[in-house]
Amino acid sequence: MRYSIYIKIIIFFLIFAVFSSSVLLFYSNKNRNEFIELTSKDFSVQDVDNLVREIWVRETVLVLCILIFFVLGLLIILSRFLKPLKQIAFACRQMKKGNLNITLPVDKKTEIGELSETFNETIKSLKNFNFYLNQARLRTEEEKNRSIDIINNFADGLLVFDKENHLSLINPQAKEFLNVESEEVVGKHISKLSGFGYFGELIQSLKKEQKEIFREELVLSPNLILEISSIFIVRARIKQGMLVILHNITREKKIEEMKTEFVSLAAHQLRTPLSAIKWTIKMMMDGDLGPLTEKQKNFLNRTYCSNERMINLINDLLSVARIEEGRYMFKVLSFDLEEMVVSSLNSLEERFLTKDIKLVFNKPQTKLPQTIGDKEKIGLAIQNLIENALRYTPSGGEVTVSLKNATMGIELCIKDTGIGIPSNQLHRVFSKFFRADNVTKVDTEGTGLGLYLTKNIIEAHKGRIWFETKEGEGSTFCFNLPV
Amino acid sequence: MKKVLIIEDEQILLTLLVRKLKEEGYEAMGAYDGEEGMKKVREFMPDLVLLDIVMPRKDGFTVMEEMQADEKLKNIPVVIISNSGQEVELDKARELGVKDWLIKTEFDPKEVIEKVKKQIG
């Protein structure tokens, strides 16, 4: 329990009152006695006058003493009260200046002491708060540095534009690609960047309307081909800016070129002698080089067929090579699948007629959505399936081609009444160079690559291919393509 | 008589085509590579060029580029006869104004003549 300053003052006043009143009482008593003593004897006016004067002096001195005593006592109490207040004021000024390393002396006995203690506690929690704030700031800074490190060391070039299309960030890789320094471009509006390095070309690709683009090719020089993507930075559904990613695809492009060249060269080398043979035999068979006997014609015809097989095999091998190259060979287009199926059927119509096989086409009930994919490759897949049906169905049979809108996208089924596939070989149907036992007896032309190619093409388009078959009764091959 | 120039490095094909075209009543001339081909295009001023792509000394694409750059040769129709036929090559050829593209193994001489007839009658 602390002594209140008020109690102190009250005690002081009480002591003072008791003391001064007792002193005054004592003296007034003394004065009275002296008067009595004087009046009991003979006295002159002079004596009375002297006594009065003496009493007056004494009383004055006494009152002055009491006053001095009072003031001094008050001063002592107040000074004990004011000194710590001054200290607190000083400490507050220091705190305002940011100095938190101050502690006030605490006299636990007074309210001021309590105040000083509270002040010290406040300073302490302020210091703690400051410490945590600093820690948090350091962590944020570290996080930020880490992000910047990632951005700066990223293999792709990165550019960030703000809401108003000012360039706010460019990483070293992007600077290298675009051949610019950050000082000259950062902070500038997109419309003012065209003059710096390759920025003109980049901005042209990003287009005026500023929409998102995905993997667009940009050739800056023969030795620098970039793939550009731009993505809107969106927070809480509001566009905050735009991120532009520059990916170097020079190497991939070079490899792609080499592959194209290789396939082209291989095709040329392998096909040249075959076409020479083909054309010569054809001309001989047509009688351009003089008349032939039946026997000669027969032999030439068989040679021609063998040569055709060789050509088909090489064509299929080239297709396999191209398919296996993967995504770079896919030339994506939007097209009408129904139109494609119809044109495939038209091109094979004559062969169906010659072999006396009924061809039925079930058109889709509703208009099909556009298919997106590699038109050439899907055409090859459809051609392969229809040709297989034609090839392995004996004369008098029937082939039904059905095209429809299904839940899993567009579905195409080709049903035949052919020889079917033996049940012990079903698992190998889609393998490279697979030919079923019963097939090799009927037909010697197939290469065993058609279904392998078809499956690869369909799966590369995220579709699925499946079949049902019964040996001697026929097969149905179906595939779907997601829309 | 309509004039056809065949630029083709495979001798047997060249001989066959020249022979076949002559039979069909065209004035046919052959060149064995791109460079000789360019020379003959200028001398002979054909109505149609049958052009191979992969050839020694100068390939078919270069021949087409040079023809495109020359005001006098620019409008001569070109039909490619090649053994290759990749999409990229076809695209490139289309850009250079090619009329038709034949893959040799998929055609016989008779069909080539039909294509020639279709172009210049």
Image (spheres, helix red, strand yellow):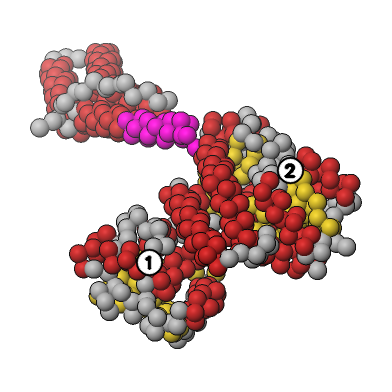
Circles 2, 1 touching at the beta carbon (< 8 Å): no
Asked whether A56 falls inside the magenta stretch, the response is no
Residue A410 shows in this picture: no
| Residue range corresponding to the magenta coloring | A135-158
Q: Secondary structure at mark 1?
A: loop
- Quarter in which the N terminus of chain A is drawn: top left
- Residue at the image point whose x is 55% and y is 62% from the top: A296
- Residue at the image point whose x is 39% and y is 73% from the top: A389
- Quarter in which the C terminus of chain A is drawn: bottom left
Residue A208 falls in which quadrant of the image? bottom right
Mark 1, other Cα within 10 Å: few <14 / some 14–19 / many ≥20: few
Which label was assigned to residue A423? none
- Residue at the image point whose x is 62% and y is 57% from the top: A279
Give the chain letter at badge 2: B
Which label was assigned to residue B32? 2
Residue beneath disc 1: A443
Q: Is residue A75 above or below residue A381?
A: above
Direction from residue A425 to residue B37 in the image, left or right: right
- Residue at the image point whose x is 64% and y is 36% from the top: A222
Q: Amino acid at mark 1?
A: Asp
Give the chain letter at badge 1: A
Q: Secondary structure at mark 2?
A: loop
Residue A30 shows in this picture: yes
Residue B54 % position (x, y): 65, 44
Q: How many marks overall?
A: 2
Q: Amino acid at mark 2?
A: Tyr
**Alpha carbon distance from label 2 to label 1:** 40 Å
Residue B13 or B70: which is nearer the viewer?
Answer: B13
Work out whether disc 2 and disc 1 sit on a shared chain: no
**Magenta-drawn stretch, dominant element (helix, strand or loop):** helix
Mark 2, other Cα within 10 Å: few <14 / some 14–19 / many ≥20: some
Residue A263 or A307: which is nearer the viewer?
Answer: A307
